[in-house]
Image (spheres, coloured by chain):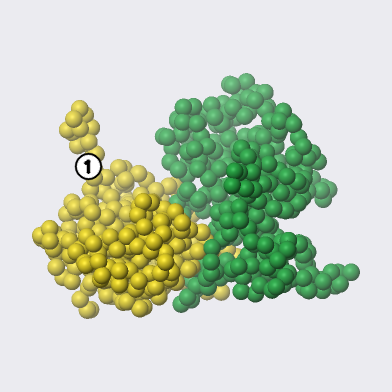
Chain colours: A green, B yellow
Amino acid sequence: MQAPTQPADDTPLLAVRDLRTHIFTRRGVVKAVNGVSFQLRAGETLGLVGESGSGKTMTCLSILRLLPRGARIVSGEIVLQGSDLVTASEAALERLRGKQMGMVLQNALAALDPVFTIGTQVGEPLVIHQRLSWRAALRRVVELLRLVKVVAPEMRLHSYPHELSGGMRQRVASAAAIGCAPALLIADEPTTALDVTTQRQYLDLLKELQQATGMAIIFVTHDISLVGNMCDQLAVFYGGLLVEYGPRQQILSQPSHPYTMALLQAIPQLGESRERLASIAGEPPDLGRLPAGCPFHPRCEAALDVCRTGAPPPVFPLAQGRQVRCWLREQEHDRSAVGSA
Amino acid sequence: MTEALLEVRDLAKHFPVTRGLLRGKQIGAVKAVDGLSFRIQPGETFAIVGESGCGKTTLANLILSLVPPTHGDILLHGQSIARFSPAELMLYRKSVTAVFQDPYGALNPRMRIGDVITEPMAIHGYARRARQQRLQEVLRAVGLSADSARRFPHEFSGGQRQRVGIARALVLQPPLVVLDEPVSSLDVSIRSQILNLLKDLQAEFGISYLLISHDLATVEHMSDWIGVMYLGKLVEIGQAKTTCRQPRHPYTATLVAAATPPGRTPPWTLPIMGEVPHGLDIPSGCAFHPRCPYVQPICRTHTPPLTMLTAQHQVACHLYPEAMSAATWPPAPVTSA
């Protein structure tokens, strides 16, 4: 493995600005991503946390420009290493996918083609993007499989996906994703289908790979307790909005958005005695029928009048690079703005 | 000890694996459940924790008497169900009901909610009037409005469907409900609603739960007792708090370390080695030995029996009882922050 190369300057590897991705259906417009902004530096890990239908997967698919039919990026910018992906041509995108951007999906069995061997599937991006011969590519595949800790990689070259266990498949899928040393790895719920002990092993592996290659990772999960030791930054999604964004430690210890607070209190944690869990009344919103104002207001205990009408709350930057979309934090934002001025 | 509500004695379920024309030749067996014994007391929650493939769902099916055991016995109020007549078995199924993992698959999409919930009563011969009255009671108990009875499952969200599933499980007022991963398919913000509801219902009606889950944190929160399962066997049984804070079996310790919440360092770090082997290919001796950091020669050849450490704690591991007094093992208890 080559030495990690960290860019000296402070420009982010990936910058997403006010991204809006809507799905146009016969029943109306589904605002799946509704104004999302974040940045990611090389070597950093960003955790996208949210429930099903909160917009996190659509955000990832927008970055990869792999949106399903009917879905379209309506406005916003996605800048990867200086080039805007929103306006990029399909040919340019094909050069980027698999080379600059790798992706690992939730269900590795679905991600791997059942009729091709492991060697062929992990080797293919190397042949296409790095113009290696198949002989050289397969040699590299053995190295990659060894890197993701597959036992006896030479023998596994000729195995088919169904011959491997769940954890092993996810490792192979990761090997394919990092083959061309991408600058950005998007991992969409990579551990959800895995067992608890296998989950931990896989997370440790991701961290190791990141240290070896210096790649940035976007880690998507519905389980906020999983991102704990994994991520530098957290982005909490709710109803197509990024409701809270900032350094992981601060968000977990001092959540600012009422949704994040409630979520952290609603999860049972090992080794604490609570008779009752806090619960969030109601259900997550339907993205096709979002309420006016803040999407969380029908479930929020602290909702004000301003939360119930008009546009969703704007982004209020707070101290320490944190951002929150909640009217309750307007004053706090003013204070921190005065404090920093 | 008071009389147990349900007692499981040396229960086993082996699935034969056959080969050849007409599948006539048995080449082995998957020992999905292999010699389990435990008791569930009235009003308490007993949880079974384990990873996929450890046999927890087979155990649920055995206790619901959906599959016959290979050997062993289940006793309800001290009566063995193996000798039950079909009529008595009907009564047993009235006493032990279930809530399933997938609230979408568990409800018939063509039946109205009211019929879904009262179907068990119809099967057991209750009159229409009694069914309607009980329906209103259980709808209220699980927090659904009275008019939901006329609606169809697709009109409900996942959390509400799980409430319907719970209402159906409770409609016959059973003393024991089997909860098979009741919240794992629900959204995170909905899970605590359902967990709180289950606790409230237990407090109100004095039901016992057999909770089956892979999530140790949920189990610790919900249960009085925990049984940790690995490849068809119980490796540790103890009180929930003790087992999670001072696990004795290395496998339990691994699970605890893996479930430690973010921002807190795990109480100990155990190297996690390999993956759960396939049920057809269970290692000799202690099934956990290929993944155990404390493996000794005896572990490869002899299966450790469940041994009493204290009156409330049993563990199946060759490290015990000697390791009880060792300085390095068991690891330090979880220090709550």
Q: Is residue B134 above or below residue A183?
A: below
Residue position for label 1? B16
B137 or B142, which lies in front? B137
Tell me how many marks there are.
Answer: 1
Q: Residue at x 58, y 53 (%)?
A: A53
Q: Is residue A294 visible?
A: yes
Amino acid carrying label 1: it is Pro
> Outermost residue, right direction?
A341
B50 or A36, which lies in front? A36
Which quadrant of the figure has residue B35? bottom left
Q: Residue at x 68, y 68 (%)?
A: A308
Q: How dense is the environment of label 1, judged by Cα within 10 Å: few (below 14), some, or many (20 and up)?
A: some
B257 or B286, which lies in front? B257
Q: Residue at x 42, y 35 (%)?
A: A162
- Point out residue B51 in the picture as x, y percentages from the top left corner: 40, 54
**Quarter of the figure with the N terminus of chain B:** bottom left
**Quarter of the figure with the C terminus of chain B:** bottom right
Which quadrant of the figure has residue B167? bottom left
Q: Is residue B201 left or right of residue A8?
A: left
**What chain letter is assigned to the residue under label 1?**
B
- Point out residue B132 in the picture as x, y percentages from the top left corner: 30, 69
Task: Indicate the secondary structure of the residue bearing disc 1.
Answer: strand
Q: Is residue B178 visible?
A: no
Q: Residue at x 71, y 49 (%)?
A: A20
